[in-house]
Amino acid sequence: MPIPDFVVELRRHLGTARLWLPGVTAVVRRGDEVLLVRRADNDEWAPVTGILDPGEEPAAGAVRETREETGTQVRVDRLAAISSGLEVTHVNGDLAVYLDHTFACTWLAGEAHVADDESVDVRWWPLDALPAMKPVLLGRIDAAVSDETAARFTG
C-alpha cells in the first residue's frame, strides 16, 4: 500500500498540510551490488524507503519495507545515518518532513522483484555504476556502504 492507513486517516483531518513522519531507508548489499527500486510515483531510482507503522521499531520497519517492496529477506547490520529537515511534496500534493533512519543491510534470500505497486522495477546495481539519483539518496548509500561504525547525523 503506497500510503499507510494511519496516514490516510491523518490526511482526512489535515488535508495536504505538512506532516512529520518517521521513515526508513534500507540500503541492501549483495557483495559489490546494491538493491534499488524504480519508484512508481516519480519514476526515479532509490534504495528501499518507507514510513514506519505506529510503534514499529525502525530496523524492523526496514526489514518489512524491503520484503514488501522487493520480495527479499535482509539482515540489518547497523544504523548508518539519521537525517531530517528535507520537505517533500508528493505527487498528490501532500507535504511531509521525514525523520529518516538509514540502515546498512545485507541480502539473505529471495529473488528481487517488484512485489507491490510502489515500484515499477527492482534490480541490483554495481556500486561503481549507480543510476542517476537525488544527492540525498546517494548520501544515504554512501553512509551505508562506508566502513564507518558510527551513524552519520545529517540535516
Image (spheres, helix red, strand yellow):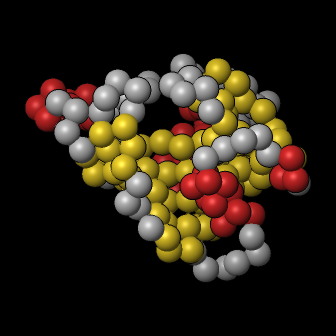
Residue 101 can be seen, yes or no: yes
Residue at 37% over, 60% down:
85
Residue 23 vertical placement versus 140 (above, below): above
Question: Which of the image's four quarters has the N terminus?
Answer: top left
Residue 33 can be seen, yes or no: no
Residue 36, position in %: x, y? Answer: 70, 39
Residue 21, position in %: x, y? Answer: 32, 49
Residue at 31% over, 29% down:
93
Q: Is residue 108 left or right of residue 65?
A: right
Q: Quadrant of residue 146?
A: bottom right
Number of marks drawn: 0
Furthest residue toward left? 13
Residue 118 vertical placement versus 154 (above, below): above
Depth check, front residue: 31 or 44:
44
Residue at 56% over, 74% down:
152
Residue 2, position in %: x, y? Answer: 44, 27
Residue 56, position in %: x, y? Answer: 38, 51
Residue at 24% over, 44% down:
18
Residue 154 vertical placement versus 24 (above, below): below
Residue 79 vertical placement versus 112 (above, below): below
Q: Is residue 69 left or right of residue 21?
A: right
Q: Is residue 44 left or right of residue 6?
A: right
Depth check, front residue: 125 or 133:
133
Question: Which of the image's four quarters has the C terminus?
Answer: bottom left
Q: Quadrant of residue 35?
A: top right
